[in-house]
Amino acid sequence: MNGRVFKTLKKRACFARFLALSTCRNEDKKISQFTNMMLKTASFRIKNTN
């Protein structure tokens, strides 16, 4: 493998990882928002039943 090809592949790998990380962060945000919502609803229901 020559150096030029390796550099290009490395750049692509980094870019792919960057994209994957940003989508993971977005998913984490969605999941945490959803969890917070569920917890709020659950605590609200518990308060209402007591």
Image (cartoon, rainbow, N blue to C red):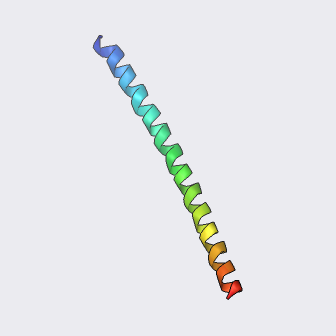
Q: Nearer the viewer, residue 47 or 24?
A: 47
Q: Nearer the viewer, residue 37 or 18?
A: 37
Q: In the image, 29: left or right of 42?
A: left
Q: Position of residue 8 (x, y in %)?
A: 38, 20
Q: In the image, 12: left or right of 40?
A: left
Q: How many numbered circles are shown? A: 0
Q: Residue at x 64, y 74 (%)?
A: 42
The single residue placed furthest to the front in the displayed view is 50
Q: Residue at x 44, y 32 (%)?
A: 15
Above/below status of 37 relative to 28: below
Q: In the image, 16: left or right of 32?
A: left
Q: Residue at x 60, y 71 (%)?
A: 39
The single residue placed furthest to the top in the displayed view is 1
Above/below status of 47 relative to 19: below
Dividing the picture into quarters, in which one does residue 50 lie? bottom right
The single residue placed furthest to the right in the displayed view is 48
Above/below status of 45 relative to 13: below
Q: Nearer the viewer, residue 30 or 46?
A: 46
Dividing the picture into quarters, in which one does residue 38 lie? bottom right
Q: Position of residue 37 (x, y in %)?
A: 63, 67
Q: Residue at x 70, y 85 (%)?
A: 49
Q: Quadrant of the N terminus?
A: top left
Q: Nearer the viewer, residue 18 or 31?
A: 31
Q: In the image, 47: left or right of 23?
A: right
Q: Position of residue 3 (x, y in %)?
A: 28, 15
